[in-house]
Image: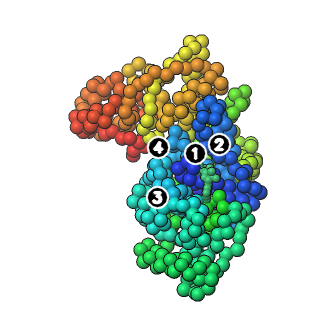
Amino acid sequence: MINEISKRRTFGIISHPDAGKTTLTEKLLLFGGAIQEAGAVKSNKIKKGATSDFMEIERQRGISVATSVLAFNYKDKKINILDTPGHKDFAEDTFRTLTAVDSVIVVIDVAKGVEEQTEKLVEVCRMRNIPMIVFINKLDREGKDAFDLLDEVEQKLGLKVTPLSFPIGMGFDFKGIYNIWEKNINLFTGESKTSIEDTIAFDDVNNPELEKLIGDQSAETLREELELVYEVYPEFDAQAYQKGELQPVFFGSALNNFGVRELLDCFIDIAPSPRPKNAEEREVKPNEDTFTGFVFKIHANMDPKHRDRLAFIKIVSGTFERNKPYLHVRNNKKLKFSSPNAFFAEKKEIVDVSYAGDIVGLHDTGNFKIGDTLTEGEQLNFKGIPSFSPEHFRYINNADPMKAKQLNKGIDQLMDEGVAQLFTLEMNGRKVIGTVGALQYEVIQYRLEHEYGAKCTYENFPVHKACWVEPEDPKNEEFAEFKRVKQKFLAKDKHDQLVFLADSPFSIEMMKQKYPTVKLHYVSEYK
Ligand code: GDP
């Protein structure tokens, strides 16, 4: 078992849309022999304009099932890539997926540099000390100077980088890549490649053969640049990388399959095998004998006639076995699963045993919520799936009085899936839906109608931010007054936690000053 676990590399690729995440994923799968040709991996991007938005959402949802987990074997490793939507309206989804990865690869477009979504996602990874490798993509195009880009990565992303490869020229003049990690050169022929090409070993860049290979000018520039690299950047340190303190950088072109093998070979050497995870009760280590795991994603069936859903479990420790009863800790109920799915490339198949680091998909009829823990009997609750304050807030109203039950059930289930956050106002029980992007309202409306036969309308509710409320003393007069004064703006979230729906930054500041013992947090998990 320990041997199996140490083979696992479970990671996510994060990027701003269009930086090349899908293309890179595909090339990684090609190396693993999991797909035979380029073009096989579908993009989970939301395409605007081509079709009406909800059709597009359904299309995207279909793809997202197929690409949730892409697993393949490479050399002696079992690699699990967890898919992360790049669209900002689905950022919550990505945040949650990041609780299930052991490391990430950050893809950056050489011309565009660090973009908005990259910043947000990297910040989340940085907060959790997730090991990150940076891949600078599209070197076949004209882009920013490599050193400038490394500076930008350090400054905008707050990282400490060290290049493990370095480009020779760029765009029209792109000649290839010097691999600092393996000490060899890979020449770029400018043709799209799908096979693994030869590299030229080169442990000494002062070797005059270099001139013959890339020309006098390029050889001189490369020597100078490498000298600067060795001077300015720290030597790579695997431990610092695994602690999230140092981020190695690779350059390449995913589309041309250039620099990808180098990335992958280094990745399997340095990336961590499954890491321990904190539960409220204790830290759980991957090689413990007994199984533990948690739900990080729930996917509803696309067919409204089959209401069952697929719950994605990250196995934290031990092995998950088919038909063995496991404890659903929140419900205090034993459950058995006769057809757990494992993932291989874009297929899923039923498996008997999966190991820590793996993801299994369990058919669920409504037992699971995101964040739920499964064990062999131990009372454990994994931490680390927080909700962030949504950006948009609207009342949701029932538009068909005959279908109130369907509406409530639909809302409940969609919230379990994590499509959006529900707040129930303390004063009158009205429901408010909070989302990261406006697109989610369409998703909810469309899915309520098509999957639950319920109709809803929305009404604006001007909220600036949701703040989770933590009174130092729930019994003191200050808290009682806070609740009296702000009663119109107080709600419960889905875990019955008290939330203050502040209408402006000003009112948050006011409350902090007036009621200093009432703490306001922007994240649901503040303890
Ligand atoms: P994603 O949104 O991050 O998944 O990006 P995609 O993988 O879909 O890539 C976005 C666009 O960039 C596509 O048109 C790709 O063909 C293109 N692309 C990806 N990698 C490269 C590359 O290395 N060079 C060039 N020139 N284009 C690339």
Disc number lying in front (3 or 1)? 1
Vertical side of 323 occupied by 170: above or below: below
* First in residue order: circle 4 vs circle 2: 2
At 37% from the left edge and 33% from the top edge, which residue is drawn?
464
Tag shown at residue 288? none
- Looking at the image, which residue sits at the far top? 402
- Distance from disc 4 to disc 2, alpha carbons, whole Å, reads 22 Å
CA–CA distance in space, label 3 to label 2: 27 Å
Q: Residue at x 60, y 78 (%)?
A: 214
Q: Residue at x 54, y 78 (%)?
A: 217
Q: Is residue 75 above or below residue 381?
A: below
Q: Label 4, label 3: how many angstroms apart (C-alpha)?
A: 16 Å
CB under 8 Å between discs 1 and 4: no
The residue that mark 4 highlights is 386
Which residue is at the front of the view, 97 or 187?
Answer: 187
Chain-order first, disc 4 or disc 3? 3
Q: Is mark 3 within 8 Å of ligand 1?
A: no
Which of the 4 image quadrants contains residue 74? bottom right
Q: Kindly check if marks 3 and 2 are in contact, taking CB atoms under 8 A apart as contact.
A: no
Label 2 SS: helix
Name the image colouring: rainbow
Q: Please rate how many residues cluster around mark 2, counting C-alpha atoms within 10 Å: few if below 14, some from 14 to 19, many from 20.
A: some
Q: Point out residue 451 in the picture as x, y percentages from the top left corner.
A: 65, 26
Give neighbour class at mark 4: few <14, some 14-19, many 20+ (Cα, 10 Å): some
Residue 150 in view (yes/no): no
